[in-house]
Amino acid sequence: MYFGEASGLKLGKATRDAFGEALKSLGDKFPNVVTVDGDVGNSTRTEPFAKVFPERAFNVGIAESNMVSVAGGLASAGKTPVVASFAAFLLCNAYDQIRMSVAFPNLNVKLVGSHAGISIGEDGPSQMGIEDVALASSFPGMVVMVPSDEITTVKATEAMLEHVGPTYLRLGRPAVPVIYEDGCDFEIGKAIQVRDGDDVTVIANGIMVATALDAAKQLEAEGVSVRVLDMHTVKPIDDAAIAKAARETQALVVAEEHGPAGGLGAAVAISASKSAPVPIAYVNSGDCYAESGDPQGLLEKYGLTPSAIVDAARSVTQR
């Protein structure tokens, strides 16, 4: 059983796999794109691009800080570097280099953090990026995207390469359900309404979108009408979609595979407070580090489940 199966969603590719395939296929369209890797290209899936375009692929070894500095230099020379590593390694190890070599000079560097969240499972907490969205969002001018399935990942990858300026794309390790089997419209900063509803809106991204759809189905059986928004872009956040949802449903739940500080929940709360303050409940991995374990078991232990979203929705609708 995987989250999303109860909603009839088929299990698809991991977002890291969809990214790797998309990057390779877009190589000819974006001839200035180069990859800068920290010796984990087989895991981040930049390896397929490197095999097709070996002269445009640079492996600097296990040295994330140097990797980012190299990318800044390449961007200054007119290239579009895609810098890929595990989310925890990239954002935590190289934060200062991202700040000084990418964000401060506002260079066209594309940061890609793979293996994000606790769903990487057995790799353990040292490699689980649970603060990466907060760290990436803290940089002025940084676009931050968290796609929910293989379809949105392909679109996010192309949007990232088309956008001029620093971006962060968050990817996961496990296979995830296909939300948009028939395709979707994707635009940086514009949420996708996956499901309509009148009583409460669940705003989610990444693997939590499929989880939210399972929760919505359960709540529907209880007579609660649930709207689901795929907030694939955390920064810039879609203020208009949040304000509309707050006015029309009068309650929000934010679900993310991230810690409680500085992620999607914080961005939604700030946005809603400016236009239509309403009760908001939060579903996240908690103010703690997880441990090594089975991915599904970890999601259940740390409350990233449909039942957790159901409970959160009840808490803001039964007033």
Image: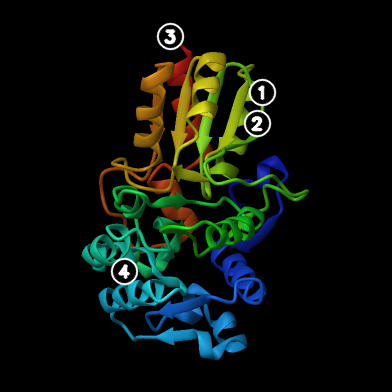
In the image, 212: left or right of 299?
A: right
> At label 2, which amino acid type do we have?
Lys
Is the Cβ of the residue at disc 4 closer than 8 Å to that at disc 2?
no
Residue 122: image quadrant is bottom left
**Label 4 CA crowd tier, 10 Å (few <14, some 14–19, many 20+):** many
**Of discs 1 and 4, which sits in the foreground?**
4
Residue under the point 67% across and 57% down? 11
Position of 37 relative to 288 (above/below) = below
Q: Which mark is residue 217?
A: 2
SS of the residue at dot 3?
Answer: loop
In the image, 107: left or right of 161?
A: left
**Label 1 CA crowd tier, 10 Å (few <14, some 14–19, many 20+):** few
> At label 3, which amino acid type do we have?
Arg
Observer-nearest of 290 and 207: 207
Q: Which residue is mark 1?
A: 221
> At label 1, which amino acid type do we have?
Ala
Observer-nearest of 93 and 271: 271
User: Which residue is situated farthest in the top direction here?
Assistant: 319
Observer-nearest of 103 and 128: 103
Residue under the point 31% across and 83% down? 62
User: Which residue is situated farthest in the left direction here?
Assistant: 96
> At label 4, which amino acid type do we have?
Phe
Q: Which residue is mark 4?
A: 89
SS of the residue at dot 2?
Answer: helix
Query: Could you tell which of marks 1 and 4 lies nearer the N-terminus?
Result: 4
Q: Which residue is mark 3?
A: 319
How far apart marks 1 and 4 lie (CA) works out to: 43 Å
Residue under the point 38% across and 41% down? 284
**Label 2 CA crowd tier, 10 Å (few <14, some 14–19, many 20+):** some
Position of 138 relative to 51 (above/below) = above
**Horizontal and vertical percent for residue 142?**
38, 52
